[in-house]
């Protein structure tokens, strides 16, 4: 794998112009930059979920496991327990993470495993043709919600902060440079790093598309948990008007679970896995 390109030769089958293309590009650029800073290509590992976003497994040339729907977090936790010297990235959708996998999400925030979670949030179960997910807007009319979604959307950033996440960020898929920068920072973070990426679904939730004008970048600075919780409520995932903050909302240090378990500390010391593995 060293010296090989980060893109496989697989033909991309996402819809033309789907922001999933942009998230792939930002991720590749982030990994490329980290490799330039001394990270090894063979020490990156990914876990992908089931959904449109999950096809990144075929296009990104790093080792990994294609997991079950809603289960990329526990699978990624398994990978980091097996080899705590890897940089593990879990990719998932909003439906997968905040619906089927929400228990894993909450406990990952508590356990603080040293993994990065990237959620492509298009506010729809898109692969299965657009049912409402927990972040879909009120009134979203679909084949399975013919009278419109009447449940309040979940605020994933607020949930992550309340559950103890040590790195919480939001990006806009359209902004490749900013997304790349945040992905790099998340991978460098020791602990559970959660990035929610807002993306349009051009086919199944058109009403929520084209929100770039609402978005603004937060100043880069340390924030208290209280301040971050307040900021996370500025956007409620439902309203058409109002501002949507982007950037790293909160970052703190707490022991990761591989720093708490003696067995994992030993594996880390022995640099198990690849000879001379270095993070
Ligand atoms: C446990 C389980 N529940 C439901 C499904 C069916 N399913 C497969 S993909 C998918 C939609 C995925 O939506 P999301 O996670 O938001 O990803 P997107 O397609 O929007 O990128 C669903 C409901 C499944 N495969 N397994
Ligand atoms: Mg989705």
Image (tube, rainbow, N blue to C red):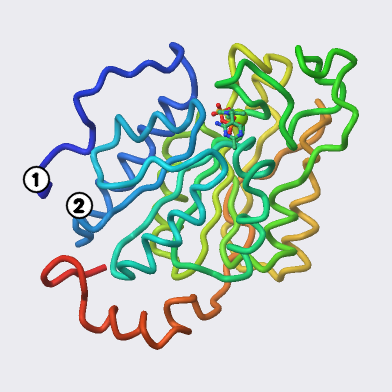
Q: Mark 1 points at which residue?
A: 3
226 left or right, relative to 124: right
Of 216 and 99, the residue lying toward us = 99
Q: Which residue lies furthest to the front in this view?
A: 68
Q: Name the residue under label 2.
A: 41
- Name the residue rendered at 9%, 45% in the picture: 3
Element type at marker 1?
Answer: loop
- What's the distance in space between the residues labelled 2 and 1, CA to CA? 8 Å
**Numbered label attached to residue 210:** none
User: In this rendering, is residue 269 above or below 185?
Assistant: below
> Where in the image, quadrant-wise, is ligand 2 located?
top right
Q: How crowded is mark 1: few (under 14 residues within 10 Å), some or many (20 or more)?
A: few
Q: Quadrant of residue 105?
A: bottom right
Q: Position of residue 67 (x, y in %)?
A: 43, 43
131 left or right, relative to 91: right
Q: Is mark 1 within 8 Å of ligand 1?
A: no
- Name the residue rendered at 63%, 26% in the picture: 125
- Name the residue rendered at 76%, 54% in the picture: 231
- The mark total stands at 2
118 left or right, relative to 274: right
- Name the residue rendered at 68%, 58% in the picture: 160
User: In this rendering, is residue 191 above or below 17?
Assistant: below
Element type at marker 2?
Answer: helix
94 left or right, relative to 262: right
Q: Position of residue 193 (x, y in %)?
A: 51, 59
User: In this rendering, is residue 181 above or below 165?
Assistant: above
């Amino acid at each position: 794998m060293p010296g090989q390109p980060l893109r496989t030769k697989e033909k991309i089958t996402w819809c033309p112009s789907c922001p999933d293309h942009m998230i792939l590009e930002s991720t590749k650029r982030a990994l490329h930059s980290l490799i330039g800073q001394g990270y090894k290509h063979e020490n990156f590992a990914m876990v992908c979920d089931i959904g449109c976003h999950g096809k990144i497994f075929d296009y990104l040339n790093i080792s990994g496991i294609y997991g079950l729907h809603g289960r990329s977090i526990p699978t990624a936790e398994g990978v980091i327990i097996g080899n705590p010297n890897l940089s593990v990235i879990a990719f998932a959708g909003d439906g997968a993470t905040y619906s089927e996998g929400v228990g894993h999400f909450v406990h990952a925030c508590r356990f603080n495993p040293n993994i990065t979670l990237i959620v492509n949030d298009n506010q729809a179960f898109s692969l299965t043709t657009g049912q409402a997910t927990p972040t879909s807007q009120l009134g979203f009319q679909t084949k399975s919600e013919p009278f419109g979604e009447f449940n309040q959307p979940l605020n994933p950033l607020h949930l992550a902060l309340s559950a103890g996440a040590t790195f919480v960020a939001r990006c806009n898929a359209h902004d490749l440079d900013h997304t790349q920068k945040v992905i790099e920072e998340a991978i460098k973070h020791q602990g559970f790093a959660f990035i929610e990426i807002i993306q349009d679904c051009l086919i199944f939730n058109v009403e929520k598309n084209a929100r770039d004008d609402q978005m603004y970048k937060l100043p880069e600075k340390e924030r208290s948990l209280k301040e971050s919780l307040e900021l996370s409520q500025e956007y409620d995932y439902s309203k058409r008007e109002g501002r949507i903050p982007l950037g790293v909302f909160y970052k703190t240090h707490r022991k990761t679970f591989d720093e708490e378990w003696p067995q994992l500390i030993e594996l880390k010391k022995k640099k198990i896995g690849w000879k001379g593995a270095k993070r």
